[in-house]
Image (spheres, grey):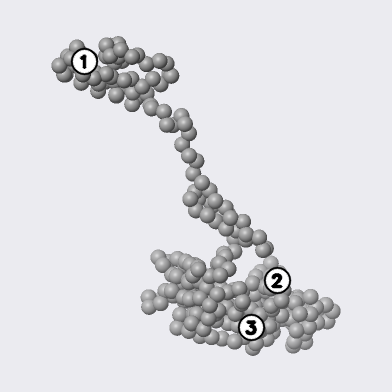
Amino acid sequence: MPQCRFCWSSSTQGDVNPLISSCKCAGGIRYIHLNCLMQWLNAKKNVKNGDNYMSYFWKSFECEICKTAYPLMIKSNGKNFHLVDYERPATSYLVLESLNQEKNTSRIVHIVKPSLGKDVFKMGRGHESDLRINDISVSRLHAMIKFKDGRFLLEDNVSKFGTLVLVNRRTPLYAGFNKAVQIGRTVINFSVKSLSPTKTDMLPKLEHLESFGVAKQQQVEGGAGAEEFDEEEEVQIPDVAGGEEEDEGGANVQQQQQF
């Protein structure tokens, strides 16, 4: 029978307190009760409380024997269990969790709770930030988190290395807007441009030519007559087919009236 390496008990309470294998340890120290692990991690955390936010910090979030970093969520018997137990407000809230890194086993969890009096939160490395992130790649005032119209918005504050959002679904591309995607240390910039109108779109439409001909014909019939019009103005008909234009004014007027 497998035993918990903390309490040395082999009893379980079904899905409430199962025996789990949360690291790379093997043999008699492989298994541990879920509640035993949660209580041990809870004793190691540091808490920072604010009026509208709460931060949990672990200097080391790993197994002390095999040095494997613990995940924030673990799966056992087809069910997911949170290793970190924190307050979940009844109103709108946002949870920020740090990612696992090879050289840094510390973990931090921020819980943002906006209210009518405060809906903008500063995030960065400086002491004036509401949500502090101790990383050299993070600027002193890196970004702003805003709560507007029931949605959380992330706005970069002209930081040195920029603010990235983890892509976990399809991302659309829009014309006129650039979108940068970072894969490892490589940044790919996508830009979609609108297609320019073709040359055929620049040619005059047939209905425009017909309207032009009718308007000129009405001007000739309502004026001093065709003979007086021939002496004063020459009517030019756009040649869409590319043929030769008439040079004589009388021929142009006759062609206009037939058109």
* Residue positioned 56% across, 70% down in the render: 160
**At numbered mark 3, what does the secondary structure look like: helix, strand or loop?**
strand
**Are there few (<14), some (14-19), or many (20+) residues within 10 Å of tag 2?**
some
> What is the C-alpha distance between the residues marked 2 and 3?
24 Å
Q: Is residue 225 visible?
A: yes
**Are there few (<14), some (14-19), or many (20+) residues within 10 Å of tag 3?**
some
Name the residue tied to disc 2.
76
Quadrant (top left, top right, bottom left, bottom right) of the N terminus: bottom right
**At numbered mark 1, what does the secondary structure look like: helix, strand or loop?**
helix
Q: Amino acid at mark 3?
A: Trp
Q: How many marks?
A: 3
Q: Is residue 74 left or right of residue 4?
A: left
Which of marks 3 and 2 precedes in the sequence? 3
Relative vertical location of residue 65 with respect to residue 153 in this rendering, above or below: below
**Which residue sits furthest left?**
224
Relative vertical location of residue 226 with respect to residue 30 in this rendering, above or below: above
Quadrant (top left, top right, bottom left, bottom right) of the C terminus: top left
> What is the C-alpha distance between the residues marked 2 and 1?
98 Å
Q: Position of residue 127 (x, y in %)?
A: 51, 83
Name the residue tied to disc 3.
58
Nearer mark to the viewer, of 2 and 1:
1
* Residue positioned 64% across, 78% down in the render: 107
**At numbered mark 2, what does the secondary structure look like: helix, strand or loop?**
strand
Q: Is residue 111 visible?
A: no
In-front residue for pair 153/198: 198
Q: Position of residue 189 (x, y in %)?
A: 58, 55
Q: Amino acid at mark 1?
A: Glu
Nearer mark to the viewer, of 1 and 3:
1
Q: Is residue 188 left or right of residue 48?
A: right
Name the residue tied to disc 1.
231
* Residue positioned 79% across, 75% down in the render: 24
